[in-house]
Amino acid sequence: MPLKPNELAEQNSKFRIGDVLLAEPYGGLQHPITGQVERIYENSLLIEITDNQKDDQITVTEMNHRAVVPMDSVEIIKHGPKPKPADGDGNKSNRK
């Protein structure tokens, strides 16, 4: 079955769902933000904003604690869990 565009972007990206990132300020934000990757697109990431400066709280609340940030403007702080490999042959375990 062919991959959806979103799944293809995830496979070809150095980012993973669950990565914790530091993103540069943009739009109405005055300071960098910390967030966790929720979705991976071709050149950008959807993150849940987990930490921000007090000055930016109103803007972050208006953004519903979500932001789409360009991949080239973020730094990975902590990698998320590695995705589990798909079991292609259908074997669940080696039971006796």
Image: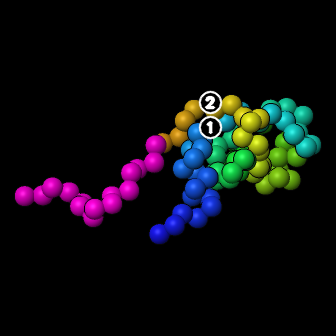
- SS at mark 2 in the image: strand
Q: Is residue 44 above or below residue 73?
A: below
Query: Which mark sits nearer the N-terminus, 2 or 1?
Result: 1
Q: Mark 1 Cα within 10 Å, few/some/many (few <14, many 20+)?
A: many
Judge from the rendering whether residue 74 lies leftward or rightward of residue 90; answer left or right: right
Q: Main secondary structure of the magenta part?
A: loop
Give left or right: position of 87 versus 58.
left
90 is within the stretch colored magenta: yes
Q: Nearer the viewer, residue 16 or 5?
A: 5
Q: Label 2, on which residue?
A: 77
- Residue 24 at x, y percent in the picture: 80, 33
Residue placed furthest toward the front: 2
Residue placed at 55% from the left, 35% from the top? 79
Q: Out of 74 and 5, give the one closest to the viewer.
A: 5
**Mark 2 touching mark 1, by CB under 8 A?**
yes
Measured along the vertical axis of the image, is residue 34 above or below residue 84? above
The relative height of residue 41 versus residue 16 in the rendered view (above or below) is: below
- Return the residue nearer the eye: 22 or 73: 73
Instruction: Please state the extent of the stretch shown in magenta in the rendering.
Output: 82-96
Identify the residue position indicated by label 1 in the image.
Answer: 20
Q: Is residue 53 visible to the viewer in this orientation of the structure?
A: no
Residue 77: where, in percent of width, then height? 62, 30
Q: Indicate the amino acid at tag 1.
A: Val
Amino acid beneath label 2: Ile
Residue 42 percent across, percent down from the top left: 69, 51
Label 2 neighbour load within 10 Å: few <14, some 14-19, many 20+? few
Spatial separation of the CA atoms under disc 2 and disc 1: 5 Å
Residue at 85%, 32% (x, y): give it. Answer: 31
Quarter assignment of residue 92? bottom left
